[in-house]
Image (spheres, grey):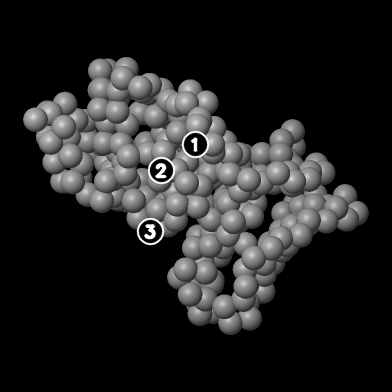
């Protein structure tokens, strides 16, 4: 997993191409791209923070415009934050603007729903795009 | 990190010549923009017309640059592609950043405030 973050763009490109070939609309494909980028970066940054080896499995099911994405990894256990409101507050001064924390917010906003399970030393994230 | 840079009066127009602004790019992006600011740019107009993919790290990098420039200097955006615009709207960052529909619009707006 050298240059680990470089992996994500390549995976996303492959997935985008595949979704096109099976006829998923551009809008839905973009939604999946945005969410999957956040989910994969999260796995790489947190799940495999101290690891050079890891196993990541992505499974995508398409039923017309309904897309379900399963992301499973054997990295460190993590729990999605329960508070996934926008980190942005309008009274924020420039200095206090958050530079992070938008990832889970995007996942929550774009998916219809998502589930998280910890099973047999694996993290399983299921993302629904209805 | 490739930029095409043009000076329009006080405005430094930088066109990001990358198709992605993501976790893999955000550190290099911040370093490159900081360098432009440190060289004396006081009003940056970042043209994102080539960027067809941005994630939350890319968004964070933009926020970081706006903070780096502080309240005395300006950091503005133009050329948001539909995907990037979507991320801005969802996170309400479109209300935080000054975003122009085109470079021309941004340059005219700046001229009007000078008059």
Closer to viewer: mark 2 or mark 1: 1
Q: Could you confirm whether marks 3 and 1 are on the same chain?
A: no
Pick whichever of labels 2 and 3 is earlier in the sequence.
Answer: 3
For residue A99, above or below residue A107: above
For residue B6, above or below residue A115: above
Q: Which chain is disc 2 placed on?
A: B
Residue denoted by label 3: B82
Labelled pair 2, 1 in contact (Cβ < 8 Å): yes
Mark 3 Cα shell of 10 Å, populated few (<14), some (14-19), many (≥20): some
Residue denoted by label 1: A90
Residue denoted by label 2: B95
Closer to viewer: mark 2 or mark 3: 2
Labelled pair 2, 3 in contact (Cβ < 8 Å): no
* Residue that protrudes farthest toward the bottom in the picture: A64
Report the Cα–Cα distance between label 2 and label 3. Answer: 16 Å
Q: Quadrant of residue A32?
A: bottom right
Q: Nearer the viewer, residue A60 or B46?
A: B46
For residue B93, above or below residue A35: above
């Amino acid at each position: 997993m050298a240059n680990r973050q470089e992996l994500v763009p390549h995976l996303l490109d492959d997935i985008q191409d595949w979704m096109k070939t099976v006829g998923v609309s551009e809008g839905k494909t973009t939604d999946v791209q945005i969410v999957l980028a956040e989910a994969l970066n999260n796995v790489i940054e947190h799940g495999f923070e101290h690891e050079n080896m890891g196993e990541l499995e992505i499974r995508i099911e398409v039923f017309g415009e309904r897309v379900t994405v399963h992301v499973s990894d054997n990295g460190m256990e993590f729990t999605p934050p329960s508070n996934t409101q926008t980190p942005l507050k309008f009274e924020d001064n420039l200095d206090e603007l958050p530079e992070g924390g938008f990832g889970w917010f995007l996942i929550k906003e774009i998916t219809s729903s998502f589930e998280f399970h910890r099973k047999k030393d694996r993290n399983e994230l299921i993302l629904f795009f209805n | 990190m490739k930029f095409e840079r043009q000076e329009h009066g006080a405005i430094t127009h930088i066109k990001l010549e990358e198709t992605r602004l993501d976790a893999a790019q955000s550190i290099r992006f911040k370093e490159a923009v900081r360098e432009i600011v440190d060289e004396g740019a006081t009003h940056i107009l970042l043209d994102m017309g080539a960027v067809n993919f941005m994630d939350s790290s890319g968004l964070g990098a933009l926020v970081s640059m706006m903070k780096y420039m502080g309240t005395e200097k300006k950091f503005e955006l133009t050329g948001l592609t539909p995907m990037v615009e979507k991320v801005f709207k969802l996170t309400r960052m479109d209300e935080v950043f000054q975003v122009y529909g085109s470079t021309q619009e941004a340059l005219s707006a700046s001229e009007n405030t000078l008059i």
